[in-house]
Amino acid sequence: MTLFSLLGICIARCQEIEHLIAHSFVLGAMAPSERRREQTIGELINSWKRKTLGQMLRIIDEGYEIEPTVRASFELFLKMRNRLVHGLTTDDQYDIRSSWGQDEMIAFLTLFEL
């Protein structure tokens, strides 16, 4: 039960962080190509919502001078988030059917949550 609770907490945390990133940078991080395509702020916000996290972070990196530690944090979050969302439970290392895999997953999720 602890494993599933921690998994749910981390998924919710991913959604919260992505929401905050998307809403913090939507206007300031427009790529030059988007400035020409999007006519209204509403259209810009809607197009931003359809982007993947990786796409958003690339556009933010183009639009801002990001401090190296912050950039590294974004990259680590993206890497861990992608592992979590795109198949953590199907990875042999994190096999939830074995006690070893459960321990590995709890360690990963604990680190992710920090």
Image (cartoon, rainbow, N blue to C red):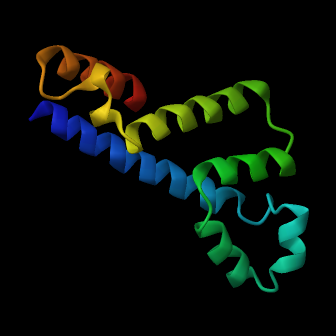
Residue 84, how many percent across, how many down?
39, 38
> Could you tell me residue 49's position as x and y percent?
59, 68
In this picture, residue 88 sits left or right of residue 36: left
Task: Give the answer, above or below, for where 56 lies relative to 102.
Answer: below
Residue 35 appears left or right of 88 = right
Quadrant the N terminus occupies: top left
Question: Measuring 17% from the left and 39% from the top, which residue is drawn there?
Answer: 4
Q: Is residue 25 left or right of residue 5?
A: right
The residue at 53%/52% (across/down) is 18
Quadrant for residue 29, please give it: bottom right
Residue at point 48% right, 40% down? 82
x, y percent for residue 40: 78, 85
The extreme top residue here reads 100
When the figure is inspected, residue 49 is found, relative to residue 14, above or below; the finding is below
Is 15 above or below relative to 100?
A: below
Quadrant, the C terminus: top left
**Quarter location, residue 100:** top left
Towards the viewer: 93 or 47:
93
Q: Nearer the viewer, residue 54 or 110?
A: 54
Q: Residue at x 71, y 57 (%)?
A: 25
Say left or right for 68 vs 94: right
| Residue at the left extreme of this rendering | 1
